[in-house]
Image: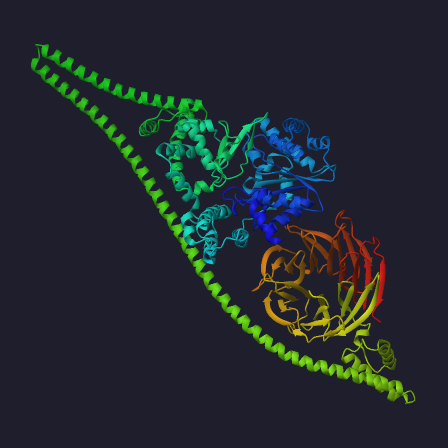
Amino acid sequence: MVENETNEEKKRITAPFVGLRPFQEADKDIFFGRDEYVDNLVGRVRHHRFTAIVGAPNTGKTSLIQAGLIPKLKSLTSERWECVFAWPGRHAFGGLSTAMAEMLRKGSETELNLKISIENELRDNPSGLVEVLRRNGFDEKVKLVIIIDQFEELFVSQPGTDSDREEVRNFVNSLLTVTRQSIYQIHVVVALRTNFLERGSMVAGLSETINQNQHLIPTMSSRDMRLALKKPLRLFDIPAAHELEDRILGELDGASYSLSRLQHTMLGLYRLWVEDKAKDEDAELTEEMYETVGTVLGSIDTQLEGMYTSLDDERKNVVEALFRRLVPISMEKKDQDLPTVIELCHLSESTENTVVDLIKSYARLDRFFLKIFTEGGVDDRLTEFNLTGDSDENVNLGLNLSSRVVLTTNLIIDEWKRLGEWRKKEEDKAEIYLRLTHNAWLHDAGQTGLYKDPELGLALQWKEEHSPEEKWATRYGNPQDFQEALAFLEQSRIDALEKAKAVERQRVRKVARARVLAITIAACSILPIGLAIYALGERKKAVKSENKAMHVMALAEESRNRALRAEKDAISSKKQSEFEKKVAKKALVEAQQAKSRAFVAKKKADRATQEANKNARLARVAAKEAKKATNQAVLAKAEADTFRYRDLSRVKVLETLRKSGVPYPKMRNTMLEAYSLNEKFDGGGMYTDMYLALRKAVKASNTVTLDYLDDNYPVYCVAEQGGTVVTGDERGGIVFYKRNGDNLVLTGHAQVEGGVRSMVFGPDAGTLYCGTDQGEVFLVRIGGGTQEKGVSVKEDLPIKELLWTQTTDGAKWLVALTKTGLHCLDIEPGKRLELVKTYPIPNAVAVASHPGHDDRFILASHGKASIVQVGDDMPTVLKEYPSIPQASCVTCKHDRSGLLLGDASGVVHFLDFTTGRISTVTRHASKVTAVRDVGGNDPKMISVSLDNKIHLVHWEDKSEPIVFDAQQGWLYGIQTTSDNRLFYSVGKKNDVKVWYVNAEDMVNVLKRHRN
């Protein structure tokens, strides 16, 4: 059956990895590594009307919702769920109304009309969602979850007018309103990035609601990544070398966008493996294939560069223009900066067919470098178009000249080296343009003058090199800014030219005046020589002035040349800096690869160590088998002695019956010997009535003290399984009862050394484990009350708690808790108790089982609580929460939403796994000794304390606790039955009491004293 199901999964899924695209609902069978987070999220959504899924960019929020939350909710058999999944986009009401129409009509011809009707209702009425459901006959018993993904788009995709901000407020208020109504069971889930949390203050009440209902999604741990890598390979029967798996995980350790890198790289590896498998049936994933796809640190660059180099020169130019335009100006305005196909055609100066073909090639689902949005519909809203399949033809659906295009992930910008160079060119070009527009605006405002050299020379050089056009500049401002900037530049050029001409005209006038003066002096006859000399002097001055003007112009030209050289030097320095940055990045990659190789070497060493440990374990097993054979021989002799002494006991009983005429003391001694032999060798099942008579006679004659019948010692613990109830007291007495309806019937007893402080039934029927105040653990066989020799866990330290668990490799362990730490005992069936491991944990106070996970348990210590998984080597802390400083007992809620912790001051606390917050459930007057959570249709919490009081709290209505005086002195322990109908309490007085869980007045049902 399992094999058939696996084959069906393979047929349904085309590949074990999804590449760069997010997981969808159809990919639920290959979505691994997030099981625990999905379970926690489902529990959160089921019990809360509003949930905010918050995480850093690229933590997989969309995948967690589509492949985790939605399929899990739909698979619940106890509840029926309908899911509505929407993006806000530019028009949030339009996106939600379309998703609602699809849910209510599921492809009906009236879906478009219904969508218009729903949108009008949502815009006009804050409770419009409820009215839409009522009008369309939505079943009130069905739970509806409305999921708004990329919730931050509400605050970044809107143009920013007053009407747009009002629409955002109305949309958010509609979502908050439906969570407060009681007609329909509507749950709202929003997903947003952590860096947009503060934007919630734009809408009143939103920030408070998000803060109170946050569900944080962390980045994937190393363990999660290992599951995401290995499980898909096993599902598709794809062999891979351990060294390759270790190398991949090592290179991913600490890398950003780790899940996207893994999925993209493994999809490329899978394609290569499929090609090899067609030639070789035994093909496996190899490190050579891994190098071919570029490794997890370079597979995106490898694929994009391969696609680019395969194009002709014309298409290469088009791709450069496309990607330079698709790189966002800033990450915050990314969702506002979406170019249309027609805009990309104009920018690239290419035909529509060429641009569309290239977009389709890069947007294929098996590549998913580009994402396509289609504008349409009555409200002109922006809707993401979901593609299916791997061929280019998929992209034809919905793709037109008004479609918008965006990069799917910032990882493309970071990893594609060529795109980094294009981005740098675009930034340099834009930087000079933006500085030019700014100075034009300042000049227009009268705050600065026109450009002069060297700024004028740089701007003119920029214009000559790039020939900027208005369609390019509109990305950085409006067309008027572009025209004003060019006008400012032209005006600066003309002004500089006019000033140069004015200097030249002044020089020409000076030379002309000097010549006229010289002619006048030459014509004068009175002082010909003096005038000639004067004219010559003036001519020399004119020539000197001319030379000076020429020198000034030469200096100006030299200054301009120096500015140009300085600019070139700056550009050269910048290029040198970029080169050094590339060298540093290459060194970082090499360092990461070296780290990966070291990681692989460490894994090999670890594997060798594990092999050595395995051999050591085999040796220990062989020793155990030898010891077991010896013990079996001893047991065989003991069993033979048992039968012999039982026969001797029966003989003495018969002898007693024949001594009717013998004086009483002699008969009493014979009775005492018979009874002692019977008790010592477990003969209680033979001649029952006869031995009961002997017991009463011995008791009456006061010749034997039987500890288990004494009423003066406190009962510390109680356990229940399948109607069998067992109690343990301070003197080591263990008493067995059988529940008959609401009554308890005494069925047997046993005695161990030391006071019994804790007990638990084993995983196999008929075994009970008891922990004593002397640090020993005893195995008690329930059938006849016999016990095996105890195993010392920690000498003279009381064993506070006992529970059994199993390791990740299936071995069964018994976990004993003392104040110094955890002690693990091997309890495999057929084997004797054996202490195998001890883990020092200072200040540990309590342990409890984890519902639904046999290999996990809860550990409480002073100041923190932990979820621990038992491995074959040592327990692993999966999660840790800040706790209370004086914890005394702990248990996990049945729905796994949190912990119940009792403390020494008498307070019972609830620790919420989702929020990490700690709240008060109830207060006792003294130390809380035990607490239990009762699941079922009416969940409750029961706690007891040293003040002799039992508290019962209903979870649903959170009313005041029902309190009852148990009249047992100090209360030490409680235990619920498997059907949650009854529970037992034990305390300082030597008795066990039975209570109805659902009795509102806590009326005591039955009290059974041991005597």
The image quadrant where one finds the C terminus is: bottom right
- Quarter of the image for residue 736 reads bottom right
Q: Is 27 drawn above or below residue 487 in the view shown? A: below
In depth, the one of 198 and 562 nearer the eye is 198
In depth, the one of 327 and 952 nearer the eye is 327
Q: How is the image coloured?
A: rainbow
User: Where does residue 831 sit, x and y in percent of width and height?
Assistant: 64, 72
Q: Is residue 323 visible?
A: yes
User: Where does residue 282 sit, x and y in percent of width and height?
Assistant: 46, 55
Number of numbered discs present?
Answer: 0
Q: Is residue 965 visible?
A: no
User: Where does residue 527 sit, x and y in percent of width and height?
Assistant: 8, 12
Rendered residue at 12%/16% (across/down): 535
Q: Is residue 941 left or right of residue 515?
A: right
Q: Is 499 drawn above or below residue 302 in the view shown? A: above
Rendered residue at 63%/44% (across/down): 71
Q: Is 474 drawn above or below residue 231 in the view shown? A: above
Rendered residue at 69%/82% (across/down): 637
Q: Is residue 748 left or right of residue 64?
A: right
In depth, the one of 785 and 3 nearer the eye is 3
User: Where does residue 463 sit, x and y in percent of width and height?
Assistant: 34, 27
Q: Is residue 970 left or right of residue 441?
A: right
In depth, the one of 728 and 137 nearer the eye is 137
